[in-house]
Image (cartoon, rainbow, N blue to C red):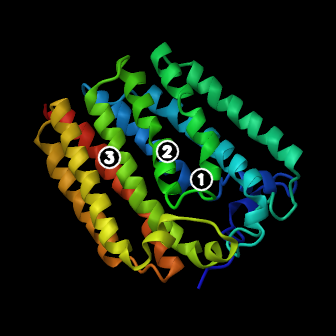
Amino acid sequence: MTQASDIPKDGWIDRWSPASARPYLRLARLDRPIGTWLLLIPCWWGVALAGPDWPEIGLMLLFAIGSVAMRGAGCTFNDIVDRDIDRRVARTADRPVASGQIGVPAAILFMAAQSLVGLAVLLSMNRAAILWGLGSLGLVAIYPFMKRITWWPQFVLGLAFNWGALVGYVAASGRMAPPALLLYAAGIAWTLGYDTIYAHQDKQDDAIVGVKSSARFLADRTRPFLYAAYAATIALLAASGLAAGLGWPFFLLLLAGLVHLFWQASTVDTEDPRDCLAKFRSNRDFGFILLAALVAGHLAA
């Protein structure tokens, strides 16, 4: 059974923000930070992979600001495009644009303001990072439409959400290299896993409105797919670490990451939306395990 609205009730937005600001804060998903974490963490991975020791704190902060802004802009764009579908899905019917709390023109202006913040962050980086960062715009633009034409919108999300691994690496090192490309590929495989879990929350409503997803396509084959996607994630991460010359602590902590992903794949209940959401959110923990692995691997090397 699909859960009700995904908008938290009586959270910090309701308690502490002016009534006029609440729809915009919810449109930017500021009360649901997991999406920001999953956008930010690959950026931090890229910075950490570039080494040679501790990641540059200033660069990490820039990516944090940029991820908040660009995740908000992306959610706003997605909600504008999907407003008619969202009205027909229980979990999304109360979203600000779908419910009419924010009109489309106002949402477009809000998206533009957030995008300008993200652009300002990007322009503060080196030229190579700017060029690589601009390269993600096409993926961001097409993603909301993918669920209408392919069973694998999760793959396009993986391409977009993990682009920051490439930008982070280039921002820290000034160049592109094979370890970063392997890291990016690992992020795509990781996203295929976690977003398939997420998509199981909506599979009943998606079938009614005709929206496609990997969850609907895989159905009872989801668990074997998760094992395969997460195995590919770990294999590609190991290859990235080897290519970067990381020390043994990287591989030890990567083993801890493998245990975490195996736990997700083996215990998720795809018929329970609450469990799907909990397992999806747990990927922030995996992200931090790998970040620690990258830093430790450089320090040991």
Relative horizontal placement of residue 298, taking residue 280 as reference (left or right): left
Mark 3 or 2, nearer chain start: 2
Residue visible at 47% across and 73% down? 276
Q: Is residue 42 above or below residue 270?
A: above
Mark 2, mark 1: which one is toward the viewer?
A: 1
Relative horizontal placement of residue 47, taking residue 96 as reference (left or right): left
**Looking at the image, which residue sits at the far front?**
149
Residue visible at 41% across and 42% down? 42
Rounded to the nearest angstrom, the CA distance separating label 2 from label 1 is 14 Å
In x, y percent, where is residue 18? 84, 54
In x, y percent, where is residue 231? 24, 58
Q: Amino acid at mark 1?
A: Met
Q: Is residue 93 above or below residue 287?
A: below
**Looking at the image, which residue sits at the far bottom?**
1
In x, y percent, where is residue 203? 56, 75
Q: Which residue is mark 2?
A: 161
Q: Amino acid at mark 3?
A: Ala
Q: Residues within 10 Å of mark 3 (few under 14, many from 20)?
A: many
Instruction: Say which of 121 and 79 sits in front.
Output: 79
The count of marks equals 3
Q: Quadrant of the C terminus?
A: top left
Q: Which element is circle 2 on?
A: helix
Q: Which element is circle 1 on?
A: helix
Residue visible at 62% across and 79% down? 3
Relative horizontal placement of residue 8, taking residue 180 as reference (left or right): right
Q: Which residue is mark 3?
A: 186
